Image (cartoon, rainbow, N blue to C red):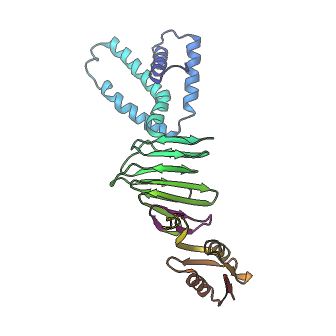
Amino acid sequence: MKNLQYKEIQAFVFRLWEREVTEEKTSEKEKELLDQWKTGVEINLDKNHLKESREKVLFYLEPYFTSTDISAHPNLFKKYIFQAAAAIVLLFTIGGFFIYHSFFKADVYYAKSVNREVKLADGSVVILLPGSQLTVEKSFPQDTRVVDLKGNAVFTVAKSKKHPFIVHADGFSTKVLGTVFKITQTGNNKTVDLYEGKVAVSYAGAPVAFLKPHQKWTNFGIPRTAAVISYEKEKTSHKALPSLLSLSFNDVTLKEVTEVLQKNYSISIIYPKQFAEKKITADFTGGNTDENIEALAFILGLEIQKEKQTYILK
């Protein structure tokens, strides 16, 4: 049985059901196989999928029951009804199982210990990194190409001006028309690295970010925080130095805000301990270090004292 192809298995099981319904002799071994098939299939079907399968089956069987040509032949009609009944029983169980898996159940791809390449129907290619999972609905690709990602992956998306490609990840989504990018999810830390084209990154509580090549979107592992970092190479050294292009916080604690500012601006910020859990909402896009710290102090109602690379808020 394991070596049989799908069509061979389908024909074999249908024949056994037909013999059972028409009361032809069925061996004990055949009965055992039928019971195994029925038990194994029904546990994989829920009510919705069973209903969808039943509607499809009845739709395709209806023309046979309304035919008038066979009504003049009672014996043939009786045999035909038995065969139709066998087909219904088969399709409601095993047939329903195959209909569900062929037309409804999403395709799920896993990468266990090594990278896995997944080629999608639109020509896009996804490289799943170890421990990652990609879910693709049977309807892909439609007007909007949508996939779900758990873990990390590199996407090379087939270009289409009319059909956006959207990757739903853990708490954020990336929308493109055709490009090459990488999504990384490590715990709470989420990043999108863009290599070619353009992408739009949507994240709850943060403005939509539009990336260009050699730019990265990240939340620094903090909810409702978003930043865009440029990795453009310097003309003289040709080194890719990070440059913070945008930074926004939406209802984030002062402790977390200052941790991000200190790390990205290579500064130290000292503030009263009682302000540590105070929630901050601010957009520091476009400002230099001094301007951004001044804006932060204004929000808190504090004054600034600067000593070299240390900012004291009091």
Q: Is residue 275 left or right of residue 54?
A: right
Where residue 51 sits in the image (x, y, percent)? 45, 38
Where residue 268 sits in the image (x, y, percent)? 68, 78
Residue 281 lies in the magenta-colored region:
no
Tell which of 135 and 62 is nearer to you: 135
Looking at the image, residue 198 lies above or below residue 266: above
Q: Quadrant of the C terminus?
A: bottom right
- The prevailing secondary structure element of the residues shown in magenta is strand
Where residue 297 sits in the image (x, y, percent)? 62, 86
Q: Residue furthest front?
A: 236
Can the viewer see residue 168?
Answer: no
Q: Residue at image x 56%, y 60%?
A: 191
Asked which quadrant contains residue 34, the reply is top right
Where residue 229 sits in the image (x, y, percent)? 53, 67
Looking at the image, residue 18 lies above or below residue 201: above
Can the viewer see residue 247?
Answer: yes
Q: Residue at image x 63%, y 60%?
A: 188
Q: Is residue 97 left or right of residue 63?
A: right
Q: Residue furthest right?
A: 273
Asked which quadrant contains residue 82, the reply is top left
Tell which of 88 and 233 is nearer to you: 233
Residue 224 lies in the magenta-colored region:
yes
The part of the chain drawn in magenta is 208-230
Q: Quadrant of the N terminus?
A: top right
Q: Residue at image x 55%, y 67%?
A: 242
